[in-house]
Amino acid sequence: MPKKLKPSKGTRKKSPTAKSPSKSVKTKKSSAAATRLGKAKNSAGRAKSPVPKATKAPPKIQRVPSARFSGAVAALEAGIKLMYAEDYARAVKAFNKVIAEYPEEPEIQASAKARIHACEKKLQERARTVFRTADDHYNVAVALMNSGDLETAMTHLQSALKLAPKADHILYAMAAASALQGNRDQALSYLKQSIHHRAENRFQASQDTDFAVLAEEQAFKDLVAPPDK
C-alpha cells in the first residue's frame, strides 16, 4: 500500500481563529454607554425638580362710596373755596366740620386734614407779621384755638375786640373760646352779643361742637332757638 505523505511544514495551514475585539473599540462603546446613562440621569433629575409657577397679584378691592359721599365732597369743596379766598380761619372750621361729620369717608378726611395743616401754616405766617387790624388778631386766634392754645387765643381775641367791638365773628370766637375753657356765663354773654349783631350766628352756634358744654342749658337753647315769626 502506498504510504501517506506527510504534509510539509511550509504547506501546513493554521485553523482559523476568531479575532477578539480591540481595546479601543471596547473603550469607545463603554464611554458611549456612560454618556447615555449620564444624559438619562440628568433628564430624570430635571423632571423631578418643580417648575416655579408665576404668582398673580391679588385683585384690588374697590371701595364702594357711601350714601353720604356726595355730601362729604360738597362740604370739602366749600372749605376749599374759603381756602382759595384766603379766609383760612373759616376754611379750617369747614374742614374740621368735614372730619367730624363724615367719619365713614377716610379719603375725604385725609384731604381735609392736609388742608387744615396748609391753612394753619398760612395763618402762622400771618402771625409773624405786624398786627395792624382786628382780623390780624382774629385769624391768629382761630389758628391757636384749633391747635389747643386757648389762653393765647383769648389774648388775641381781646385785642381784636378792642379794635372792632361790634364785629360779630370776633364776638362769636370769644364765645366759643370761653365755652371751651369752661367759662359758661362769659360764653353765653359773648354769644348773645354776636347773635345781636348777626342773627345767622344763632343757627351756626346750634350746630357748633365748641358749645357742647352749653347744649343742655336753657339759656343756650333760648339763644339758638329760631325767632318767633
Image: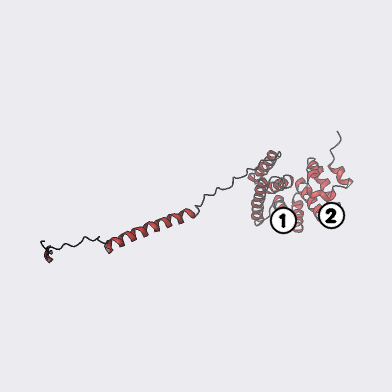
Q: CA distance from mark 2 to mark 1?
A: 19 Å
**Residue 160 in view:** yes
Q: Which mark is in front, 2 or 1?
A: 1
Left or right of residue 39, residue 22 in this image = left
Residue 149 figure quarter:
bottom right
Residue at the limit of the structure toward the bottom, as seen here: 9
Q: Which comes sooner in the sequence, label 2 or label 1?
A: 1
Position of the N terminus by quadrant: bottom left
Q: Nearer the viewer, residue 57 or 183?
A: 57
Q: Nearer the viewer, residue 227 or 52?
A: 52
The numbered disc on residue 147 is 1
Position of the C terminus by quadrant: top right
**Residue 165 in view:** no
Q: Mark 1: which amino acid?
A: Ser
The reply to whether dot 2 and dot 1 touch (C-beta < 8 Å) is no
Q: Nearer the viewer, residue 105 or 194?
A: 105
Q: Please determine whether, in this image, residue 113 is positioned above or below residue 26.
A: above
User: Which secondary structure lies at badge 1?
Assistant: helix
The numbered disc on residue 183 is 2
Residue depicted at x 32% and y 59%: 29
Q: Position of residue 217 (x, y in %)?
A: 88, 47
Q: Position of residue 104 (x, y in %)?
A: 71, 45
Q: Mark 2: which amino acid?
A: Asn
